[in-house]
Image (spheres, rainbow, N blue to C red):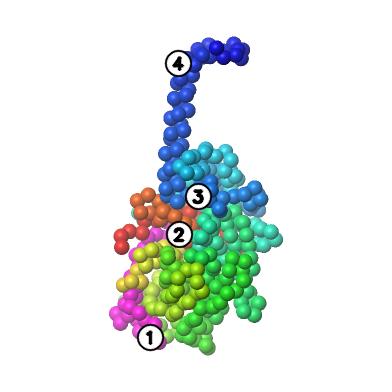
Amino acid sequence: MPASRGRSPPGVDETGGPLVRVRSAVVRITAAVLAVGCITACADGAPTASDPAAPTARDSARSTAPGGAAGGAGTSAASVRASASCTDGKCTDNSRASGSENRPGTGGGRHPCSPSVSLDRYSDALDKTTFQGTFIGNLSALARDTDGSIAAVSDRSVLIGLNGRTHRPVRAARITDEKGAVLDAEGLAVEPGGTYLVSSETEPSVRRYDRSGTLLGRLPVPDALRVAPAGQAQSNQTFEGLALRPGGGTLTAAMEGQLTGDGKDTAGRPLLRFQTWQRYGAWPGPAAYRLGKQYAYPVDAGLGVSEIAALSDGRLLVLERGFTAGVGNTVRLYLADPRRAADVSGVPKLPGGKTVRPAPKKLLADLGACPSLGAPAHQPQTNPLLDNIEGMTITGRAPGGRLRLLLVSDDNESPKQITRLYELTVRPGGH
């Protein structure tokens, strides 16, 4: 007989009667439901409690976005991200302690943008914030890091690490060129050994850095891709996107604009060039990249390529972006297949028309068709969700062969623009 704890309310059996057994059953059912949900989340690539990128007490200090109006209609729904953390298949409900209750943005859920793409959530939590004295903005590229965190680079020459789950800053390091000058960094890739490849559109160039930001070397670049008068490229229109194929064998850099003298395809779309490099030698040995094939890519009229992401089969996700004053941004996500394109590395000027076989592409979504989810805009936009989206990386897989993407917009330190993260789910389709 248990010790007396006072008179029980009517209907409660202190000795473990029917009501206690019912409550135990409810607890067991609830635990089972949480476990199933966690197993699904963990299997899809969600970070586990043992993830080295999981937030520490030091890293969990919240960033605050300025301005009460910045949250818009979506801020009240921003709270809940993953409701369970998982370790070895065991789950703990942490919806009250996720640390994301006040993140400006939206809550979870799939919001269709097209049959192939859905918007899961957005967040403005990084907008106009600092980390250890470093401004967190001007973000032009993202890449999933080897430790599960998200690497980012700003076009003000800063490498930034974001927690893989909360997307809060956890590290920052300044990078420079061989003379100690800052870079106009636009592209980023992480090598299997944890070193970084960073493209700059000034020359253009691709350099390697260690995790502290120390310069390790530089990759060769074809003369024709250099900014005039050294080459045929236009200023501020060179290496904007950078992607390393899973496994680390093939690196691709995407030109943002055309070379002088290059033509258009049969649909009147300007032909850009994608340059590849092949790595030789086993990891983690010294880097040895050699120039590889070069492909033509037909970009939509009025747009430029802002980012690329590589699939394991050799196809590329391509982000095209443009801006019209008084109207706003246009952002489209394409799937391109360089495997079906001709090598144009030996062609000084692309003649256009049917003479050149460019990489075929398929529209996955015009992001202007995504629901706005109450997102605020600081300048005219046809869809207030959109901004100057420049960075993109694949963060994991979802059921049914879908990919999870993380996108970021570059605020240019402007009060009219926002540093905004977008989480998308994408179905790229067959090979």
Q: Earlier in the sequence, mark 4 or mark 3?
A: 4
The mark that comes first in sequence, 1 or 4, is: 4
Badge 3 amino acid? Pro
Say whether disc 1 or disc 2 marks the residue closer to the N-terminus.
Answer: 1
Is 399 situated left or right of 175 in this image? Answer: left
Question: Which secondary structure dominates the residues rendered in magenta?
Answer: loop
Amino acid at circle 4: Pro
Number of the label disc, if any, that sits on residue 323 = none
Q: Amino acid at mark 2?
A: Ile
Q: Residue 320, position in %: x, y?
A: 44, 67
The answer to whether residue 194 is magenta is: no
Which stretch is magenta? 341-369
Of discs 1 and 4, which sits in the foreground?
Answer: 4
Which residue position holds label 3?
Answer: 47
**Residue 3 sits above or below residue 428 on the image:** above
Place of residue 346 in the rendered image (x, y in percent of width and height, measured from the top left): 38, 85
Residue designated by label 2: 394
Q: Nearer the viewer, mark 2 or mark 3?
A: 3
Q: Nearer the viewer, residue 32 or 316?
A: 32
Q: Quadrant of residue 265?
A: bottom left
Residue nearest the observer in this picture, 28 or 256: 28
Considering the numbered disc 1 on the image, is that residue within a helix, a strand or a loop? loop
Closer to the camera in the image, 299 or 207: 207
Q: Is residue 229 visible?
A: yes
Q: Secondary structure at mark 4?
A: helix
Q: Check the picture and name the quadrant holding the C terminus.
A: bottom left
**Numbered circle sitting on residue 18:** 4
Please give the name of the residue rendered at 53% of the width and 88% of the height, measured from the top-left corner: 229
| Residue that appears at 35% across and 65% down | 313
Count the marks: how many?
4
